[in-house]
Image: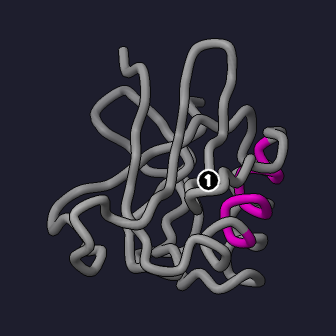
Amino acid sequence: MFSHIVIGADDTDKAKVFYDATLGALGYEAGVMSDTGRVMYITEEHIFGVTKPLNGEPAGVGNGETIGFIAKSAEQCDAWHAAGVANGGTAIEDPPGVREMGELKFYLAYLRDPAGHKLCTMYRM
């Protein structure tokens, strides 16, 4: 559904370390850092980017927003979560585990990245 997501961070070097670790746990290659300080993670269908705000203002976090990444297993969610905590992220909400919405079951894990963005991995059971 989405072509790309770009978030802001004041320290894109620190963001790259975090996202290389967490997205690497999901099977993605390390991000590419441009000469302007943008980090891009590019697949055949999607782009996820981290950049310093172009308007020169400090980066901010969207209240109520969550960026979710697809995981292929509960174990991959756990690996993503562990990689995030080990690389400057903060565990939030309940520990990784099963959540139910009616007849749907998901395995979810939540983190905040070093800049404060709320992230999730989701494995649809």
Q: Image point 66% across, 40% down: which residue?
A: 41
**Where is residue 44 drawn, in percent x and y?**
67, 13
Badge 1 local density, few (<14 within 10 Å), some, or many (20+)? many
**Where is residue 22 drawn, in percent x and y?**
72, 60
Q: Image point 23% across, 56% down: which residue?
A: 65
Q: Is residue 114 above or below residue 105?
A: below
Residue nearest the viewer, comparing 122 with 89: 89
Q: How many labels does the image show?
A: 1
Q: In this view, does 122 lie above or below 63?
A: above
Residue nearest the viewer, comparing 93 with 115: 115
Q: Is the magenta stretch mostly helix, strand or loop?
A: helix
**Where is residue 79 drawn, in percent x and y?**
80, 60
* Kind of residue sitting beneath label 1: Val
Give the magenta-colored segment's residue range: 17-26
Which quadrant is the C terminus positioned in?
A: top right
- Does the segment drawn in magenta span residue 88? no
Question: What residue is disc 1 on?
Answer: 39
Q: Quadrant of residue 71 in the image?
A: top right
Q: Image point 74% across, 38% down: which residue?
A: 73
- Does the segment drawn in magenta span residue 19? yes
